[in-house]
Structures are given as C-alpha cells and as structure tokens.
Amino acid sequence: MSSPRVTHAAATVFVRNLVLEVEIGVNADEQGQAQPLVVEIEAELSGEPWRGFSETVNYERLAGHARMIAAAGHIGLVETFAWRLAQACLAEPHVRRVTVRVEKPKALAPATAGVVIVADLM
C-alpha cells in the first residue's frame, strides 16, 4: 500500500490554560495590583516533516514569552499583552502563524472577557 500524496501539512504547537498573575488594566482600581489572565497560544509551524526538536518550537519557550511579558510591568490593555505575545512567538524559528487568546476572568465576573489575536508571516 502506498502513502497518500500530501499537498499540505501543518503542525500546531499549543499552550492552553496558562494562568498568570499580571498587573494589567486601565481602571484606577486595577493600578498597582496583579490579577489573573488565562493565556492560550497556538503556533502553526512551517515546513515538514517534523522529525527532531530542531524542526519544531518548544512550548516551554512560548509560555516563557508570556511569563516575561507579564513580569515586565504594568500593561494597560489585554490587547497590548496579546499583541506583544504574538510578536514574540512569531520571532521563533519555524512559527509562521500564531493565535493568542487572552482572557481576563475578573473583568466581567462571573463572565469572562478578553481578546484573540491572529498574526502570521505570510
């Protein structure tokens, strides 16, 4: 039996439900205190096949970008946090498209609010 002819293949490395304490918000009661953000990252990789670590992206590095942005100091908007994270992920070798979802659970509690940013190098 022969293998099917593949015309396109894509792999997506993801991080889900990464909870970070972040100083974020524009309201007066949000200044000087951290609050939780729930971060999800989907990084679509270029190329294939993926046989070794050097041909993919380390999901620990993706999560590390989110942690570094969170630790850098107060951010006004969730959109700013998500955009910075998308840019950092796209700077990783082999990442050609990234979807970043950031939820701010306390913004409209008990509902959740947030943003989704999709960015690519195409």
Image (cartoon, rainbow, N blue to C red):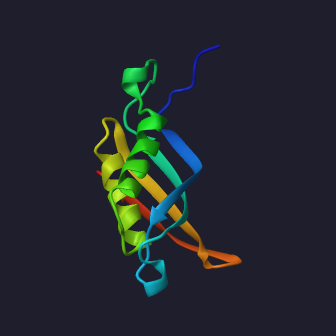
Looking at the image, which residue sits at the far front?
A: 32
Q: Quadrant of residue 107?
A: bottom right
Looking at the image, which residue sits at the far top?
A: 1
Q: How many marks?
A: 0
Residue 8 appears in view = no
User: Quadrant where the N terminus lies?
Assistant: top right
Q: Quadrant of residue 69?
A: bottom left
Front in this rendered view, residue 47 or 26:
26
Q: Quadrant of residue 93?
A: top left
Up-down relation of residue 119 to residue 33 (above or below): above
Residue at left 43%, top 49%? 67
73 on left or right of 114: left
Residue 44 appears in view = yes
Residue at left 44%, top 76%? 25
Residue at left 34%, top 62%? 73
Q: Position of residue 53 (x, y in %)?
A: 42, 21
Looking at the image, which residue sits at the far right?
A: 110
121 on left or right of 35: left
Q: Position of residue 44 (x, y in %)?
A: 44, 44
Q: Position of residue 57 (x, y in %)?
A: 41, 33
Front in this rendered view, residue 63 or 86:
63
Q: Position of residue 56 (x, y in %)?
A: 41, 30
